[in-house]
Amino acid sequence: MAIVNKVDFKLKVDLNVSIKYQIITYCFFNNILISNSDLEFLSVLAKNPNMEIAKFCVLLTNLSIFKSAQSARNAISKAEKKTLVEKKGNNKKTISLNKNINVQNEGLVLLDYKILGSESQEA
């Protein structure tokens, strides 16, 4: 029988922190590097899905996440290349988080991750 060292960590946080943690966890396990400003804009996007891109860029500048709408657009394009966001539509495109991230963004959220870290077995 294997001996497992278990770390049990319980923490109560607000929904914004919970959303950021879900995004960071997804990025970590998919080897996707993101900056703090990327994390901020992705968490805002999680709370405002299917928003028109132009309005979303204005929102990001009003929240002082980016200094200009063009900076926000550049970050969105970068996140799209990393498959973190999806754009839909032709004329007035909307933006949303990639559904694979599966961010829970309303109500009470309990994140229950169980991760087993084991040493690699060499033959």
Image (cartoon, rainbow, N blue to C red):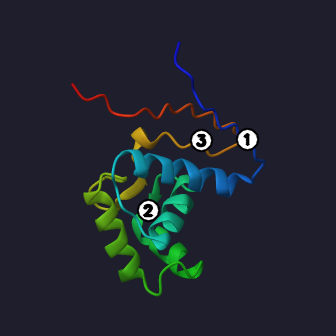
Counting residues from the N terminus, which is met first, the one under dot 2 or under dot 1? 2
Mark 2 residue crowding within 10 angstroms, few (<14) / some (14–19) / many (20+): some
Q: Label 2, secondary structure: give it.
A: strand
Q: Please state which of the two labelled residues, at mark 2 or mark 1, is closer to the viewer.
A: 1
Mark 1 residue crowding within 10 angstroms, few (<14) / some (14–19) / many (20+): few
Q: CA distance from mark 2 to mark 3?
A: 21 Å
Who's the residue at 30% across and 66% down the image?
78
Who's the residue at 62% across and 46% down the image?
105
The residue that mark 1 highlights is 107
Q: Is residue 10 above or below residue 40?
A: above
Q: Residue furthest left?
A: 123
The one nearer the camera, 35 or 106, is: 35
The residue that mark 2 highlights is 52
Which amino acid lies under the numbered mark 1 shown in the image of this protein? Gly
Q: Please state which of the two labelled residues, at mark 2 or mark 3, is closer to the viewer.
A: 3
Mark 3 residue crowding within 10 angstroms, few (<14) / some (14–19) / many (20+): some
